[in-house]
Amino acid sequence: MITSNTGEVQLNTVLPWQAKQWGRMLSHVAAKSLPHAFLFSGVEGIGKELFAKQLSSFLLCEASENESNINGIRNSCGICKQCRLFESDTHPDFKFIEPEEGSASIKVDQVRKLVDFFSQSSQQGGRKIAILSPAEGLNNNAANALLKTLEEPSKDSVIILVSHQPGMLLPTVRSRCQVLDFSLPSLTESLAWLNTYKNQLGTGDSLSEEDLRETLLLANSSPLKAISYFDIGALTEHRLMLDELGSLLKNDSLSTTLATRWNDDISLLRLSWMILWLEQILKLKFGSTLKVTQQAEKMFIYLSEKASSAELFSLYSSCLDQYKLFLGTSNPNKVLSFEVLLHKWSSLMRKA
Ligand SMILES: [Zn+2]
């Protein structure tokens, strides 16, 4: 049974491609020059939020608070009372703020509660820390309500904004934070890490190097997303979907059957793959030599030659529209959506 799962990766050590940023944080702590507000920016799925949580845990840990230890320990100890409170999600001096269920934005009421949290003294006697993620989710009122706290922070408080699209933040918010950029790991780094990770957890044992590469491709090069894809058997499901698309292109009458099957708990993921396929086909059409999934190579090259750019762009734009609908709260008829899209796919074959 396949389930939709964005599964969080649990790690005790900092991700290898974040070692430089972690080193900077350690130097701040050692020099007692830790800024009060950070903006962690970079594309989605490379571990910024995880880094923010690791940093929070480290800053609350009693071992790292002990001055003689600061240069000796590099991660939170995992044993002290603060670490245990943190790990059980019950630390009273830590807040994690994200959009409430069913909403895309962080609301002003959530920020007001946070301002109130920072105005009170620490319950455990150490720092008070909050993560807001994703920070572009702050609506204007919420962002404005946060400004004063960013400008005049209370003693020993740390606010970490995590953002995949920092350009969407109010300049007044951005300018009050120390920005730390996170970049996508290289393919070699990602593959090495995925190999180690799957060996440690015993997951994805049967995955070859080629499987790992393909999973990374599906996950837009995000190693963390790739890990969550192992859990749901995404690679197998994606390969099956490509086979089904191949059959549909030969026999349009399959569209209803496929549309019904694809309407499951990973329907949004399926639609995102459809978008990825069209991006690959369009790139091929415009002469790119990019590497597409091996299984699909022949089919995609054929489609890129057979279909016009206008048809491909029209289907691409329909997929994006449906993706927006699937994400929203209007509860669209997904079977119908898939059926319409699949008809468009098969009509690519009928044109001269
Ligand atoms: Zn500790």
Image: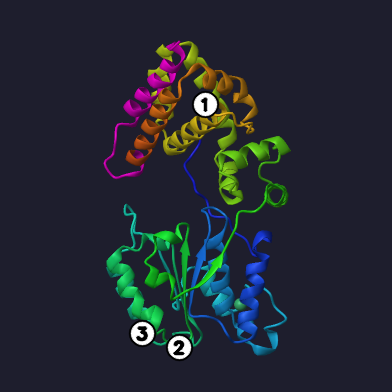
In the displayed structure image, the side of residue 329 where residue 277 appears, left or right: right
Check disc 1: other Cα within 10 Å, few if <14, some if 14-19, many if 20+: some
Write down the residue under mark 1: 241
Q: Residue at x 61, y 82 (%)?
A: 29
In the displayed structure image, the side of residue 134 where residue 297 appears, left or right: right
Q: Position of residue 93 (x, y in %)?
A: 45, 78
> In what element is the residue under mark 3?
helix
* Quarter of the image where the C terminus is located: top left
Q: Please say whether residue 273 is visible from this viewpoint.
A: yes
Write down the residue under mark 3: 119
Q: Residue at x 35, y 41 (%)?
A: 324
342 inside magenta stretch: yes
Residue contact between numbered discs 3 and 2, judged by CB atoms under 8 Å: no
Identify which residue, 113 or 92, lies in the foreground: 113
Identify which residue, 5 or 336, lies in the foreground: 336
What whole-number distance in Å separates the C-alpha atoms at marks 3 and 2? Answer: 9 Å
Write down the residue under mark 2: 155
What are the residue bounds of the magenta stretch? 326-352
In the rendered view, tell whether residue 159 sits above or below residue 273.
Answer: below
Q: Earlier in the sequence, mark 3 or mark 2?
A: 3
What whole-number distance in Å separates the C-alpha atoms at marks 3 and 1? Answer: 53 Å
Q: Position of residue 71 (x, y in %)?
A: 71, 82
61 inside magenta stretch: no
Q: Residue at x 41, y 87 (%)?
A: 121
Residue contact between numbered discs 3 and 1, judged by CB atoms under 8 Å: no
Ligand 1 shown in quarter: bottom right
Residue 57 picture quarter? bottom right
In the rendered view, tell whether residue 25 sits above or below residue 170.
Answer: below
Q: Residue at x 41, y 25 (%)?
A: 310
Check disc 2: other Cα within 10 Å, few if <14, some if 14-19, many if 20+: few
The kind of residue tagged 1 is: Met
Q: Earlier in the sequence, mark 3 or mark 1?
A: 3
